[in-house]
Amino acid sequence: MSEIASRRSLLVSIILAIGILIVGFASGPWHWLAIPVALGVVGLGSIYQRELESIEADLARKTDQNDTFAEIARTQKSAVDAFADGLDVGIFVCDSRAQIAYANRFAQILFGFENPLGRSLLAVTLSVELEHLALTASDEKRVIETEITFSFPKERICLARAWTTDDPPERVYLSLVDITELRRMERVRKDFVANVSHELRTPMTVIRVYAETMIDEDSKALRAKYLPRIITEVDRLTSITHDLLVLSTAESGPIRKGPCELGGIVRYTLNLLAPQAEEKGLKLTYEGPEDLDIEANASQMTQVIVNLVENALKYTNEGGVDFRLEDQGEFVRFDVTDTGIGIPEDHLPRLFERFYRVDKARSRASGGTGLGLSIVKHIVEAHGGSIHVDSAQNRGTTFSVVLPKGDSTSMSVG
C-alpha cells in the first residue's frame, strides 16, 4: 500500500506542475498549445489511474491470499490439536534442552499437570529416564524406543518413543503409550498358567502314586485305603475343570440376561445350603423382600450366591451367616455376613485373583479350588455391578454386591 501512496503523490505533483504550465501557456504566446497539453494531461492521468487501480487490485488479491493461507494454517493447527487431544497417547514436543513446547491433553492427565508449556520435561514428569531419552534423541538424531516405569502421580508403565526433525528450529517429539494394564494382564496370565499347572499336577501325582502302589501290591486292604483317595482327587480335578469352564464363560462375551426373581433364587440357595449350616451348628438367616425382580442371568446369579454363602459357611466355626437383600431403586444390594475367622488386611487386595488362597492348606482341605471368588467377581462385573469385601481377622467377613436392576421385562430368558 505504501507503493500506491507514493505513486498517487507523484501523480498529484505532475498534474499540479502541468496545470501551472497550462496556465502559463494560456497567458503567453504559446496559448494555442494549452488545449492539446491539457488533453494530454487528462489522458496521462487516466492511464496512471488505471495502473494504480491494477496495482491496488493485485495487492488486494495478495492480501486475500495471505488471509486465506493464514486461515488454512489456523484450521490445520486446530485440527491437529483436536486430533492429538483425542488420542489415548501422551504427546510432548520439546526443544533441544527438553523444555516443553507442546503437550496434548492425555499427557497433561497422565502426569496431573495442567499447563506444562515452558517447563522442563523433568519438572513435569519427575522422570530422569524420559528426560535422558529426549536429550539422547536430540544429540544422536535417531528414533529411540524404550519402556519406562513412572512413579508419579501413580505407578504406570509406558512405552516411550522419541525422535527429532531436521527442519529448524530443532524439536524433539515424544509419545507415551500406557501399557500398565497390558503388563498386569501378562503377569496375571503367567500366574494363571503356573497356578493351573500346580493345581492339576498335585492330584494327578497323588493318583499316579496310589495307582502304581496298587499295581505293585494289589490287595483288598490297599484298595480300601487308596481307592477312596483316588476318587477324592478325581473329584478335585473335576471341580477345578468345572470352575475353569464357569470362569471362562463369565469372561467370554456378553451376558444373556432375562427376567430374574432374585428373592426366589436367594431363598432356594439358602434352603439348598441349610444342611451344611446345620451340620456345623451354624445359623443361616435371610432378611429382605420375598420377591425382587431384576434383569440378569438367573443361572449365574445362583452361582454367585452359592459361592458366597458356601464360602462363608466353610470359614465360620461358630455363630452363623446372614444374607441381607435390599431394593435401592435402580439398584439392588445384597450382603453376605459371617462370624468366621476373617481375612487379614494384607490379603484383601488379592482376594479375587484366580487360585489365590489366604490359607492354602485349609482351602485345599475344605475342597476349595481357589476360583470361587474370581468367578463371583467376573459374573458381577459382567452384569454391570460391583463387589466389595470388608473383613478383619477373627472378626468375620462381609461381601457386598451391588447390581443394576435393569428392565426385567425387556429381554427373554437366556
Image (cartoon, rainbow, N blue to C red):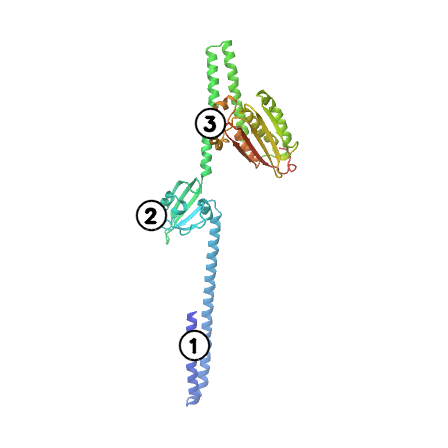
Q: For the residues marked 3 and 2, what is the alpha-carbon distance in whole angstroms?
A: 47 Å
Rate crowding at label 1 as few (under 14), some (14 to 19) or many (20 or more) other CA atoms within 10 Å: some
For the residues labelled 2 and 1, the Cα–Cα distance comes to: 60 Å
Q: Residue visible at 43% across and 85% down?
A: 22
* Mark with earlier residue (1, 3): 1
Q: Residue 283, how many percent across, how many down?
A: 59, 24
Q: Secondary structure at mark 1?
A: helix
Is 264 situated left or right of 250 in this image? right
Q: Nearer the viewer, mark 3 or mark 2?
A: 3
- Label 2 sits on a secondary structure element that is helix
Q: Give the camera-side residue of 388 and 1.
A: 388
- In this rendering, which labeled residue sits more in front, label 1 or label 3? 3
Q: Nearer the viewer, residue 295 or 404?
A: 404
Picture residue at 42% right of the left edge, 82% below the top: 18
Label 3: which residue? 195
Residue that numbered label 1 is attached to: 11
**Disc 1 and disc 3: Cα gap in Å?**
97 Å
Pointer 2: what residue?
Answer: 139
How many numbered marks have been drawn onto this rendered protein structure?
Answer: 3
Q: Amino acid at mark 3?
A: Asn
- Please provide percent x and percent y for residue 113: 44, 47
Nearer-N-terminus badge (3/2): 2
